[in-house]
Image: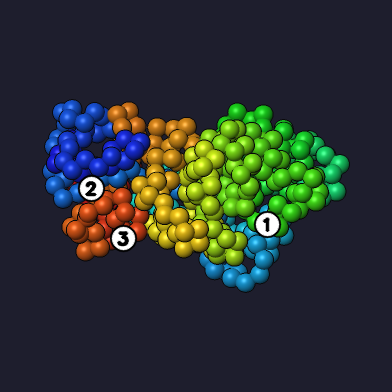
Amino acid sequence: MLLKNLSVLYGRDLKYIHSANLPVLGDKFGKLGQKNGKAVDCEGLLLVPGFINMHTHIGDSIAKDVTLAGSVDSKIHPVLGAKQRILRQTKPDHLISFMKNSCHSMIKKGITTFVDFREGGPEGVSLLKQALQEIPIRGIILGRVESYHDKTQIKKNLPLTFDAKKILSQVVKNSDGLGISGANENSDSALQYYSRTKKLRAIHSSETRESMAVSKKITNKTETSRALQLKPHFLVHMTFAGMADLKLAAKKTNGIVICPRANSSLAEGIPNFEAMAKAGCTVGIGTDNVMINSPDMFREMDYLWKTHMGLYQKRIDPKEILKMATVNGGIILGKKIGSILPGFLADGIFFDKHSLDLEPMHNPHASIVHRANETAISAVMIGGKIIHGKL
């Protein structure tokens, strides 16, 4: 397929090209100008890399807005939270049905890849895989062993039990890696054991002031310094991480994934992107728990751009925010996705440049970040196939 007369945000710097001929070779992009296959006239369309939602919990799609009041722990604590009680009480077929709904919703909003922290051990991983069987979205599943240490056990540095290790091997075998709840629920020994696994590893860190205080009280170490014992490919949240921990993250991980709307929904502040960038971190963006947040990257980008200016009086270049939703996700994951480049998977969103909310488009990056929504999408492509809308 040859996409002719197409406007495109090209490469890892999302360079705007007004008119280009872009080939799609099977499931990948070819070189600009290279002739290939049937030509499709894309006059009036802007192609943007498919959004990569770098952090979701779509298992709680069945619990939308169930708990609006209360503390963070009362809602989403991995052992005691309302979310966990609901998940344990939900029939598997109901859970699968609502996870499918969230996947369809993401596709319509231009999300072509999502990275899910899947609770429930091997069974939880299996349920999400079943939900994805007939849906073309690319789901990256980070499973979890439902084994947690309390404060006393962390102080004693108890290792994972034999049974937990057996479950871990099943989780790793059947998923894309590990999505660990946090350092405050795991001993150093457990984190170090998890670090030996060979697939993707990620962990929540420094999401709340309380979690940071708990880490200091129990171990006299920062939550992030303990989380880094996992040797994670990326850290999630880092909303209250200090500059020293941000510099450690920049040095020892592929990047940080922030979830601004979720942090705000939980009354826990706004991530300081400027500080993260100053520390040298690559930053991705995610929508987090469906229970408290819609899986909508348009809302996430717009919210971050404006609240960051309001809170820190620092304007972020909208191109940098769009990179968080596309290019940076691919970099953090170490995969050829998130950019329109030769050899990269052909994932993209075709925007109608003449849609009511976008025309006239003087700054395409700003237009996508704070004006676009799903109504401006003409089509969504995943792996070279149009799976939503039409050209």
Who's the residue at 27% across and 51% down the image?
A: 364
Query: Against 216, is 82 above or below?
Result: below
Mark toward the start of the polypeptide (3 vs 2): 2
Secondary structure of the residue carrying numbered label 2: strand
Instruction: Judge left or right: residue 7 versus residue 273.
Output: left
Identify the residue position indicated by label 1 in the image: 209
Residue type, mark 3 in image: Arg
Mark toward the start of the polypeptide (1 vs 2): 2
Secondary structure of the residue carrying numbered label 1: helix
Mark toward the start of the polypeptide (1 vs 3): 1
Identify the residue position indicated by label 3 in the image: 371
Q: Of discs 1 and 2, which sits in the foreground?
A: 1
In-front residue for pair 139/316: 316
How far across and how far down the image is residue 82, in percent?
A: 66, 64
Q: Which numbered circle lies on residue 385?
A: none
Identify the residue position indicated by label 2 in the image: 46
Instruction: Judge left or right: residue 379 versus residue 239.
Output: left
How far across and how far down the image is residue 307, in percent?
A: 46, 61
How far across and how far down the image is residue 215, in percent?
A: 75, 49
